[in-house]
Image: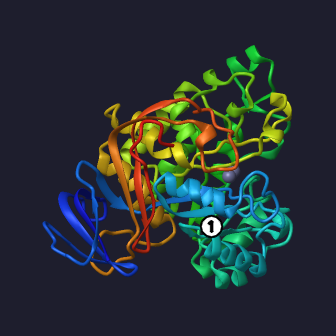
């Protein structure tokens, strides 16, 4: 038994924001009430801290199997726990690709043995994510995938997307797409604009994303499937999602912390600013912030994409795309969204909990009988993120050395405290 005392319980599902105790018994929440007495229970004093439902990251790369020099399920999920995440959804672009049930099972077995948080894999949409034949979606669903995607690249053609959507509709799985027009993307390393010209780097226009988003939304309308837009990054894409939602289509989207924090003006000759989709314009960022505030955006997702230093420490043009993200996501959300006055703390909690749960067709609540997954965080703990102290095997972040106000403090999965912050100045 674990008794979490004196915390500010924040539950977006019931719009609860109150000082309550939470008693956990086994893997479930036993009781939520003021002043619970449970002499036999281990106590966690959450005075001054927020107790939220367990954070879910809809989008990450754990690199196992196949790229263990960059990350493993063990190191990646340890970083996730330190970011407050209690469940993470790894994308299928491992080696081999997670395109059949035996790979799905191997990932889940490894997670069972090595992960402190829940691992909910995403299966590939097409075999090898090659954009030709369908992957073994039904068998992977049986094995435990929670969605499908060819992330790293878009689902190649409208015809294939239609097949994937027909399948996923009958299996009640979301189709998650990395939206990008391949012909406009070709060779690009950042967003096309004044800054790409200034740096002499090959850029892709914002339309490369929104053209694909428009295609996908029309296919969702045609098939009735649930469509989730991964790492949405442009104003035009957001506008398309907003209109689709107004029409009642089952379309959702996620935004990464780096896209709501940085813009293409921040890009320099440093591969820690190279990610796909690339950082957008100032106008894009403003639109994303508005979408986070008005409810158009369903989830904050990290797209945690670790790459070992040997891969990233090369010329900008040659470096792989992607940045790490688990350990800085909440702090960036607090900095950019809550402390800046753009959204409420309850809305931020929604973007990390009930929002992503809804994309997966699940619920997330702090109530008796629910799974005992909780994220406990501070809104004002002062700390500095040092990539060298990260639990991830990789160091590719543009936020190394950044100081924050607010941080994850403890992570509870299935009734167990899987991580808690040491309260020392140099922690994390
Ligand atoms: Zn992607
Ligand atoms: Zn990704």
* Location of residue 355 with respect to 396 vertically, above or below: below
Q: Is residue 350 above or below residue 160?
A: above
Tell me: residue 4, above or below residue 295: below
Q: Residues within 10 Å of mark 1 (few under 14, many from 20)?
A: few
Residue 389 visible somewhere in the drawing: yes
Residue 33 location, x and y as percent?
Answer: 16, 70
Q: Nearer the viewer, residue 391 or 317?
A: 391
The number of discs equals 1
Residue 217 visible from this viewpoint: no
Q: Mark 1 = which residue? A: 222
Q: Is residue 197 left or right of residue 345?
A: right
Give the answer, above or below, for where 145 lies relative to 179: below
In what element is the residue under mark 1?
Answer: helix
Q: In the image, is the residue at mark 1 within 8 Å of ligand 1 by its beta carbon?
A: no
Colour theme = rainbow
Picture coordinates of residue 82, whole percent (x, y):
50, 53
Q: Residue 156: give x, y in percent of width and height.
A: 80, 58
Residue sitting at x 36%, y 79%:
28
Q: Residue at x 45, y 72 (%)?
A: 362
Q: Residue furthest left?
A: 35
Answer with the quarter of the image where residue 381 lies. Answer: top left
Res 410 quadrant in image: bottom left
Figure quadrant of the N terminus: bottom left
**Drawn side of residue 182 relative to residue 400, left or right:** right
x and y percentages locating residue 385 in the rendered image: 52, 36
Task: Please name the residue shown 56% across and 62% down the image.
Answer: 88
Query: Farthest residue in the top direction?
Result: 198
The residue depicted at 68 percent of the width and 56 percent of the height is: 61
Q: Nearer the viewer, residue 329 or 385?
A: 385
């Amino acid at each position: 038994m674990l008794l979490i005392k004196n915390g500010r319980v924040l539950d977006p599902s019931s719009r609860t924001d109150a000082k309550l105790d939470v008693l956990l018994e086994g893997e479930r929440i036993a009781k939520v009430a003021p002043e619970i007495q449970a002499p036999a229970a281990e106590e966690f004093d959450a005075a001054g801290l927020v107790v939220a439902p367990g954070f879910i990251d809809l989008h990450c790369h754990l690199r196992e199997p196949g790229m263990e020099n960059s990350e493993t399920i063990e190191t990646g999920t340890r970083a996730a726990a330190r970011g407050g995440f209690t469940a993470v959804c790894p994308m299928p672009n491992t080696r081999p690709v997670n395109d059949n049930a035996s790979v799905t099972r191997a990932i889940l077995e490894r997670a069972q043995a090595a992960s402190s948080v829940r691992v909910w894999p995403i299966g590939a949409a097409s075999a090898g994510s090659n954009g030709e034949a369908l992957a073994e979606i039904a068998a992977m669903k049986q094995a435990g995938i929670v969605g499908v995607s060819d992330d790293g690249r878009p689902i190649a053609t409208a015809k294939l997307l239609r097949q994937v959507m027909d399948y996923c509709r009958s299996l009640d799985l979301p189709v998650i797409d990395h939206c990008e027009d391949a012909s406009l993307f070709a060779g690009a390393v950042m967003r096309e604009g004044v800054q790409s010209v200034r740096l002499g780097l090959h850029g892709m226009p914002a339309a490369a994303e929104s053209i694909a988003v428009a295609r996908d939304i029309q296919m969702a309308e045609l098939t009735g499937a649930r469509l989730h837009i991964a790492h949405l990054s442009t104003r035009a894409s957001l506008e398309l999602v907003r209109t689709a939602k107004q029409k009642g289509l089952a379309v959702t989207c996620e935004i990464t912390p780096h896209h709501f924090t940085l813009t293409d003006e921040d890009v320099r000759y440093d591969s820690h600013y190279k990610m796909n989709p690339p950082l957008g314009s100032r106008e894009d960022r403003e639109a994303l912030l508005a979408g986070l505030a008005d409810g158009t955006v369903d989830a904050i997702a990290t797209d945690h994409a670790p790459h070992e230093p040997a891969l990233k420490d090369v010329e900008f043009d040659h470096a792989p795309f992607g940045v790490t993200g688990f350990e800085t996501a909440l702090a960036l959300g607090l900095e950019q969204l809550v402390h800046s006055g753009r959204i409420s703390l309850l809305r931020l909690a929604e973007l990390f909990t009930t929002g992503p749960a809804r994309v997966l067709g699940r619920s997330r609540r702090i109530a008796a009988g629910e799974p005992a997954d909780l994220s406990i965080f501070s809104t004002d703990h002062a700390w500095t993120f040092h990539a060298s102290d990260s639990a991830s095997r990789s160091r590719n972040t543009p936020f190394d050395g950044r100081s924050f106000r607010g941080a994850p403090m403890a992570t509870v999965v299935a009734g167990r405290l899987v991580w808690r912050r040491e309260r020392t100045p140099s922690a994390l």
